[in-house]
Structure formats: structure tokens, C-alpha cells
Amino acid sequence: LLKCVESLSDVLDQPLPHLEEAKEEASTDGPGIEVLATGGEGENTDYGPFDDEETRAFYCDIPDYLTTVPPALLGLSPEAIETKKLENSSKFGDGADGGTESLDEASSMEDVALIEEGGEQQDLATETGGDSSQEVTGTNEGDEEDKETPHYKLMVLIDQELPESHGREQIDGISERFCSNHGSSKNSRKRLAKALFQVPHARLDLLPFYSRLTATVDRVWSDIA
């Protein structure tokens, strides 16, 4: 604006008038525009890049099956578990829950109960097996036995239940069952990794649940992620 006035003054051969500088009025609304609304006093709203506490917990609060699942089910030695815990601590930070010991005790008691129940059922089947007739066809027996095999259960878990996961509790249940029943097998982990990699283009809604499952299993075995 000043240059335009100087040019006009030279063309008209008139002296340059004195221009007063406008004074800036103090704003009473604070500096700039507040983009993010802050909560009330005493309310913790530091969710980082997440919108709310539920979303933050979904991506950050990952279950640790090294402390809740018995080592025998994971197929890892106590030394390997301690090494993996140190690795997770240096990679993800210390996020251990206070109730780890109680969870270990509950898991151990549950495993003992399952073993005892399985032994009772096996004894009962042995006792009644000699008196059972041979009228049942071999095909039906084969179908029932196939449904109880680990291979069939893994197929149902990965091919049927995993693509239908739609909640945090459901995907955590799938990850816990995989780690407890199938994770100790390297072939099972390869099959899971293949299923996680081949997400259908029309099912992008599964990506958050698959990522949580990957992060959970990666804390036990590093060959998934």
C-alpha cells in the first residue's frame, strides 16, 4: 500500500501525505483459535493420537500371555520366557499388571481341573468301550475323531472364527486359544501368518482386529510380526 501511494504521489507531483499506523486492538478471546476442545478440570483427556480411552486401550493395552498362560502350553522353557519378557520390556516398556500372580494361579488350577476331567472321561470311555456294540459305522467315528483333532480345531479357528471377529473380547479370545492350543507349533504359526497377510479387499474392517492379534502373538513368538 505504501509503494502504491508513493507512486501516485510521484505521478501527481504532490507531497506524500502522512499515514498513521493502525493500532492493533487487544483480543479478549485468547491467541488464535482453539482447535481441540479440552475437558473439565481434573479430567484426563491425554489420549495421544486416539479419540477416546476405548480406542487407546484397543491399540495399546495388549494382553501378555507369557504371564497368564502356563509355559507348558506355550512350548517354551522358563529361561526362554524370561528372555522374551526382557525383550518385550525393552521394546514396549513395563506394562505388567498387578494381578499377574493371581492369573497364573487361576490358569494353573484350571489346567489341573481340565487334565483331571480329561483323565476321568478317558477312564470312563475305557471301561465302557468293551461293552459297546459295533453297530456304529466307521465313517461316523472318523468324523467325530476328525473334529477333535488339533488340525481341525486350528482350521475352524483361522478359517471360520478369525474372519468373523468384530470385537476386542472376541479377538482376544481367539489369540488366547491359539497361543494355548496351537502356538507351540511352527506350522500353525505359519498358517496364522498367511491368514493375517491375505486379508480380503472387501474386508478392510478386519485390519484393526488382525493388528491386535498380531501384536499379541508377537509378544510370545517373534516370527508372526
Image: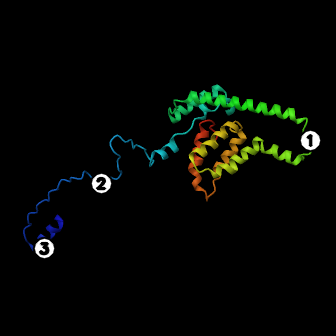
Q: Which residue is mark 3?
A: 11
Q: Residue at x 73, y 44 (%)?
A: 153
Label 2 element class = loop
Residue 205 location (% of width, % of height): 57, 54
Q: Residues within 10 Å of mark 3 (few under 14, many from 20)?
A: few
Give amino acid for label 2.
Answer: Ile
Name the colour scheme: rainbow
Residue bearing mark 1: 133
| Label 1: few (<14), some (14–19) or many (≥20) C-alpha neighbours in 10 Å | few
Circle 3 sits in a helix, a strand or a loop, which is it?
A: helix
Q: Quadrant of residue 132?
A: top right
Foreground label between 1 and 3 = 1
> Disc 1 or 3, which lies upstream in sequence?
3
* Apparent side of residue 207 relative to residue 156 in the rendered image (left or right): left
Give the CA separation, mark 2 to mark 3.
44 Å
Q: Position of residue 40 (x, y in %)?
A: 33, 45
Q: Is residue 196 left or right of residue 152?
A: left
Q: Is residue 106 above or below residue 41?
A: above
Residue tagged 2: 33
Camera-near label (2 vs 1) is 1
The answer to whether the residues at label 2 and label 1 have Cβ atoms under 8 Å apart is: no
